[in-house]
């Protein structure tokens, strides 16, 4: 699909924008497309980081794709075509939305800074339908953790047509969709009844993964037997506490490997793994390559 042309055709009226923005500002930068990927893989069409003032107003219909929109600061509003439903897009919220339906998008509190990504094909229609929300889904207060990590990884990948990059995009997009849907189901399905102490522990791991933890300490802090804690954590989250914590640590180490010049042992220490050999072994077990190889591979982007 020629996304730029499709986007311009979807504009029901000319957008109202500040003088420094043109009518294509919403979609940001276009990805190079790879013919081998076809419709079998998810196709990311564009991504952008936008800072919107007043006016900033789009009226769109029939854009055959989905979008993810993460609000960094300020706020905006997404409203359906007949103005009967809307989402208020506040700081640290993440929206998953089907752009084929009529909608308007506008600034509420300026400056509204947000990141937006447009994609289609692959399994995206399945994930969108699985939300059972015709007017899209909005998760709030997702500033840290696996969900935003998966989203931000997509903003760090190459936009070139190389098939290897498209496979990496497919992996990251799948992780984002699965994590988004999991969070949504936890909120919508009261039969899950995840104990509050488990949610606290997961939040602790997500935000303070650099700390040292032991089952004995968690047992004392939450007054729950460590055996019960492990059993219930694995039941609700599909992996043991230490497996979850190590996965979060490795995920954050990848960001440091890509965006800093810190040495391998320094990165290990920053994510809570003081023993460098242990850090390297954990990283290789999860990613299939060593931290150094990962850094060198990403530099090729």
Image (cartoon, grey):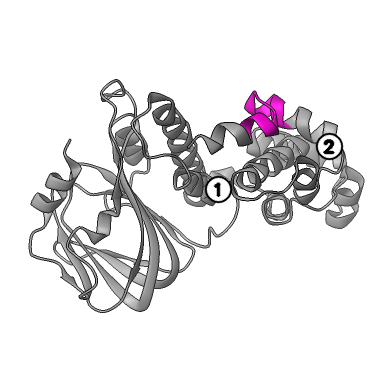
Given contact means CB atoms under 8 Å apart, are the residues at marks 1 and 2 in contact? no
Q: How far, Cα to Cα, is label 1 from label 2?
A: 23 Å
- Disc number for residue 149: 1
Give percent across and percent down for residue 60.
Answer: 15, 57
Residue 87 drawn above or below residue 191: below
Point out the stretch of residues depicted in magenta: 283-294
Residue 95 drawn above or below residue 253: below
Q: Is residue 242 visible?
A: yes
Quarter location, residue 110: bottom left
- Judge from the rendering whether residue 89 lies leftward or rightward of residue 227; answer left or right: left
- Judge from the rendering whether residue 262 lies leftward or rightward of residue 105; answer left or right: right
The foreground one among 232 and 92 is 92
Dot 2: within a 10 Å radius of its alpha carbon, few (fewer than 14), some, or many (20 or more) residues?
some
User: Looking at the image, is mark 1 or mark 2 nearer the viewer?
Assistant: 2
Measuring 39% from the left and 63% from the top, which residue is drawn there?
114
Magenta segment includes 60: no
Give percent across and percent down for residue 141.
Answer: 53, 62
Residue, disc 2: 276
Give percent across and percent down for residue 73.
Answer: 45, 71
- Disc number for residue 291: none
Q: Is residue 137 visible?
A: no
Q: Main secondary structure of the magenta part?
A: helix
The extreme top residue here reads: 36
Dot 1: within a 10 Å radius of its alpha carbon, few (fewer than 14), some, or many (20 or more) residues?
some
Measuring 33% from the left and 35% from the top, which residue is drawn there?
124
Measuring 44% from the left and 48% from the top, which residue is drawn there?
155
Could you say whether the residue bearing mark 1 is in a helix, strand or loop?
helix
The foreground one among 272 and 25 is 25
Residue 238 drawn above or below residue 245: above
Measuring 17% from the left and 35% from the top, which residue is drawn there?
1
């Amino acid at each position: 699909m020629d996304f730029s042309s499709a986007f311009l055709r979807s504009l029901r009226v000319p957008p109202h924008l500040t003088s420094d923005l043109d009518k294509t500002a919403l979609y940001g930068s276009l990805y190079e497309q790879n013919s081998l990927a076809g419709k079998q893989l998810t196709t990311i069409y564009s991504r952008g980081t936008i800072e919107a003032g007043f006016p900033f107003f789009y009226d769109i219909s029939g854009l055959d794709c989905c979008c993810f929109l993460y609000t960094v600061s300020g706020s905006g509003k997404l409203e359906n075509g007949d103005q009967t439903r809307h989402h208020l897009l506040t700081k640290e919220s993440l929206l998953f939305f089907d752009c084929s339906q009529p909608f308007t998008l506008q600034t509420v509190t300026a400056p509204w800074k947000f990141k937006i990504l447009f994609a289609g094909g692959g399994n995206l229609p399945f994930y969108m339908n699985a939300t059972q929300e015709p007017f899209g889904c909005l998760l709030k207060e997702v500033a840290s953790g696996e969900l935003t990590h998966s989203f931000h990884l997509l903003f760090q990948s190459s936009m070139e047509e190389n098939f290897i990059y498209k496979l990496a995009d497919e992996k990251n997009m799948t992780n984002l969709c699965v994590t988004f849907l999991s969070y949504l189901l936890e909120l919508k399905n009261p039969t899950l009844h995840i104990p509050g102490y488990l949610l606290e522990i997961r939040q602790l791991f997500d935000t303070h993964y650099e700390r040292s933890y032991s089952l004995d300490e968690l047992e004392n802090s939450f007054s729950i037997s460590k055996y019960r804690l492990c059993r219930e954590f694995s039941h609700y989250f599909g992996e043991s506490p230490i497996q979850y914590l190590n996965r979060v640590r490795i995920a954050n180490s990848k960001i440091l490997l890509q965006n800093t010049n810190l040495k391998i042992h320094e990165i290990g220490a920053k994510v809570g793994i003081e023993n460098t050999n242990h850090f390297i072994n954990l990283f290789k077990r999860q990613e299939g390559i060593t931290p150094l190889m990962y850094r060198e591979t990403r530099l090729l982007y």
